[in-house]
Amino acid sequence: MNPGSVEDMVSQQQVGTAPANPLVDWSLAAGTGAFLVRGGPTVPREEAQRAVTELRELTVDAERHVRELTGLGTGLPLLPGDVVDRPGWVRAAAAGLDALTSHALDDLDEEEREPGRLTPIVAGGAGVQTGVVLAFLGARVLGQYDPFGGEDRSGRLLLVAPNIVTAQRAMDVSGRDFRMWVCLHECTHRLQFTAVDWLRDYFADEVGRLVGGLTEADGIGAVIGRLPETLREAKKSKTEGSAGSMGFAELLQSPRQREVFDRLLALSTLLEGHADYVMDAVGPDVVPSVATIRRRFTARRKGGGLLDRFLRGLLGVDAKVRQYALGAAFTKHVIGEVGMAGFNTVWTSPNTLPTRQEIRDPQAWVRRVHR
């Protein structure tokens, strides 16, 4: 059979981006990232076709299993995910980030949104820089649930076929098992935002508070100016949550933004850790080789060359890996103490979300919420 790329098997859905807003020219970011991102692996046509077809089909089964385990999402429609290639993910990610930041800017008053504060030249420069970051991530991201994605901005589940095939072949694990395992993780994220009706708006509002600081006259300039100091701190910092550990995210912080940053970090850690817990807890009845996949995937997360490790640290990817472990440990501990129904109390309101401190001390959350 003639070989072909996985991209050849992916039906492209063009995702447009709105004109540049005062923060980032997202159209330029999408175009830059899609141009720079590397192509996917060359595989036999049958393998590529099987991977794409299974990914589309498995999302429905995966979400059914997640619902049975977590008790979330009863009555919601079971929907397939969208399978994309690397440029497709870059464009979709840029569109989702555009929607999210535009929502944040809509909440600012007219003076704060004054065009002169951040000129189109600065927004264009930020667009190019963001495109470079998206290109780097676009060759690595396996999947994503974007709560602001899609043409109607109602949410979109994305599975990046070339990256899933690349990871599966590198780890030498069952193709179907690995695809189901990835789908379990991403479907958990989709349920978090679709079954918890307040979470999407809460997340957008918190991001709006964080992004609002960047509309100040020196916002982007201050971010760039702090880069050398952040890089120096990153070399010294080894513990999650301290200076430098979150990469570029740390550059967004100012003293008045610390509280909202901590809330967002705690939420992100909870969401990632909960999804990581679920994808393993569904068990070998659904993913027979789950133990082998987890072991090899964890080892793969730590790998890469010197440049790759440097870029991951700079972009906060390594800190995100630590989030998975912290959030999964929190989820496992709480479920062990109060059961799944007790854990689901976390979704009651923003007041029942764990704080950054409680993520590291789950028993403190149990005492506060279940006293």
Image (tube, rainbow, N blue to C red):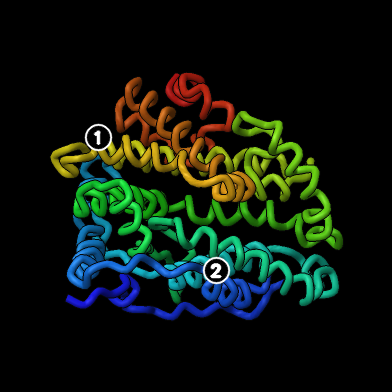
Q: Is residue 28 visible?
A: yes
Rounded to the nearest whole Å, what is the CA distance between mark 1 and mark 2?
A: 34 Å
Please identify the residue farthest to the left as the structure is shown.
285
Q: Residue at x 47, y 70 (%)?
A: 92
- The amino acid marked with disc number 1 is Ala
Residue 94, numbered circle: 2
Q: Choose between 96 and 75: the one closer to the eye.
A: 96
Label 2 secondary element: helix
Horizontal side, residue 278 vs residue 37: left or right: left
Counting from the top left corner in percent of width and height, residue 2 is at 21, 77
Q: Which residue is mark 1?
A: 291
| Residue at image location 78% in from the left, 45% down from the top | 254
x then y, percent, for residue 274: 39, 39
| Among numbered discs 1 and 2, the one appearing first in the sequence | 2
For residue 123, above or below residue 306: below
Q: Check the picture and name the quadrant holding the N terminus.
A: bottom left
- Which residue is depicted at the point 59% across and 49% down? 307
**Residue 28 in the image: x percent, y percent?**
63, 76
